Image (cartoon, rainbow, N blue to C red):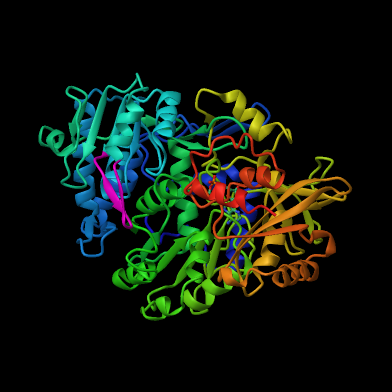
Amino acid sequence: MEIRDNLQIKTFAEYKKTYQKSIEEPEAFWKTVAEKFTWTKKWDKVLSADFKKPEVNWFQGATLNITQNCLDRHVKNHPNKNAIIWEPNDPNEESRHITYKQLQVKVCNFANVLKQNGIEKGDRVCIYMPMIPELAIAMLACARIGAIHSIVFAGFSSKAVASRINDSGCKMLITANDYYRGRKSIKLKEICDEALENTPSIETVIVYRRTVNPTSMKEGRDKFWFDELQKAYAECDPVEVEAEHPLFILYTSGSTGKPKGMVHTTGGYMVGTTYTFQNTFQLNEKDIYWCTADIGWITGHSYIIYGPLCAGATTVMFEGVPSYPDFDRFWEIIEKFKITHFYTAPTAIRSLAKQNVKHVEKHNLESLKVLGSVGEPINEEAWHWFNDNVGKTKCPIVDTWWQTETGSIMISPLAGVTATRPTFATLPLPGVQPAIMDDERNEIEFDGKVAEGKLTIKAPWPAIARTIWNNHQRYKETYFSAYPGYYFSGDGAYRDAVGNYRITGRVDDVVIVSGHNLGTAPIENAINEHEKVSESAIVGFPHDVKGNALYAYVILYDHNDATNSLKQEIRDMVSKNIGAIAKPQKIQFVTELPKTRSGKIMRRILRKIAANQTENMGDTSTLLNPDVVEEIQKKKV
Ligand code: PRX
């Protein structure tokens, strides 16, 4: 598989034809795609699946090693091409350029460290590291020997790490001593030490020295990365695994209960992420691709590491934050490496749009060809700001809808090939069959009319998570019970008359006001269109007459504008854009919203504050900014 092979769709007509074929003959379609990859043994059957059970198998009977596809194959064809370009947090520290050949050697070398510490095929390894190349090396080294990595975002607390380690019984923890994110120093090993008090399954801890600071090490358990490397060979043959062998576990929060360890398997995930990477972003050989996500999230797994590397691309990793040392850091990096493809999150776009536009204007962004957005609905204002100021109206924006569970992009424009439409993820990728369900749980078939309802997927695609670690029953209940025979995404969607999809937000965020179903995302969109508003979040709260009413938390560009007359303007804006029914009953101006570290607003907390149910806030450990909860509560209206 190479970047530009004949699997890249080049015209809208070709998209239509390919999509049709992928739906009518899914096995023949995915077989053609899969044949571009390196397998040790080909499959007996492309697909056997039943969403009713649920059970999904892709490429059964096949064996492979994914690192042969993302390393060895490219080492043969272009050993000196950069695989990873790494930009440190501190702009005065040198960036690192790692070629495919160098990456292969590093991965093999570290794979031997895993082996010499007793890690074997099927063992779970927890990786808790900052955004440094060694994180990529550690994950690929696991894949090299068939060990299952479980990456925990380095912003999580010790409790969160411990519970994830225990849930999947990890034998090893790989971490770093400490590091800087912006101006903040994070003592990762100390957090690990706290976690390790309650993780009996961990036998070995490998510690990468990111700084020269002293590090406490426990005799017999903790070992330094470099010391271990010295003892290890540089060559390591890839271990052959079955197509359905788990590649990794990645935890995602549920609307209730503890995090779910989504299990992704090897063959289908490889085919799905690579194919969607190639077609969504439309890279050329010499392009430089940058996804700003953290590898601790699915976006980083699929579209910093596995997709881009399997396709032989150059992928950029950034250790820092967009605001350090100043708010132009993203734009500076784009200029520095001549980034062609820039994939980021609406929350980042909105926070940068709040800054003086001079930050953007002072950098030469001419290298950019394609922009991308992921993780939440992108509001119209942010879309236009991104399009005008970053893309200079020349770069298509791929608004990619997908999930930890889907593994790969599901609905998105193909850059420059299919049309974009602000706030719409637009059309499904080949092989993806979305369906909209009505309140009676029936599918609303596409008939050239607009439709709105719950978003499901009605046929298996290669990168779907196969189960929840140790809890197949929860997998079944969460995703396959609401609509038997369909995968339920938990999202709502609107489909326009030509079949473009717009994600309207989580359906658990839908509020019913006076019997009307109101998605919170469109109301927020309307509020955000006010020129003084930077961001907003809407939740429902109980109301005597209407059943529910709406509570709006609104962040302004300038907090001095927080007046009652502005509240009225905001209500009028909603009235104008959606209807009087959607007008928020209460509006509270806030300076920040409670967000998870991946940038998602934790609405559960906002709902509790709005409903005056603040005795038990539940788990707030995954919040980026826990203090904000009290601040909002104090000023409740
Ligand atoms: O609600 C959708 C939203 O993010 C959810 C998935 O979150 P997570 O598993 O953390 O994965 C995020 C990265 C893929 C979805 O159920 N979401 C994701 N992408 C979009 C989106 N909402 C609207 N538009 C998107 N492009």
Quadrant position of residue 57: top right
Residue drawn at point x = 53 percent, y = 29 percent: 468
Q: Is residue 590 visible?
A: yes
Taking the view exactly as shown, the residue that stands out farthest to the front is 634
Q: Is residue 133 left or right of residue 588?
A: left
> Is residue 527 covered in magenta?
no
Residue drawn at point x = 33 percent, y = 35 percent: 191
- How many circles with numbers are drawn on the protein? 0
Task: Examine the rendered structure and indicate whether residue 512 appears above or below residue 247.
Answer: below
Q: Is residue 32 visible?
A: no
Q: Nearer the viewer, residue 19 or 546?
A: 546
Q: Is residue 527 left or right of residue 61?
A: right
Which quarter shows the C terminus? bottom right
Q: Nearer the viewer, residue 159 or 109?
A: 159
Range shown magenta: 176-187
Task: Examine the rendered structure and indicate whether residue 170 appears above or below residue 574.
Answer: above
Residue 455 x, y percent position in the rendering: 70, 47
Residue drawn at point x = 55 percent, y = 24 percent: 471
Quadrant position of residue 108: top left
Q: Is residue 10 left or right of residue 226?
A: right
Residue drawn at point x = 48 percent, y = 67 percent: 371
Residue 428 x, y percent position in the rendering: 62, 55
Q: Nearer the viewer, residue 158 or 117?
A: 158
Q: Is residue 269 left or right of residue 499?
A: left
Residue 68 x, y percent position in the rendering: 31, 42
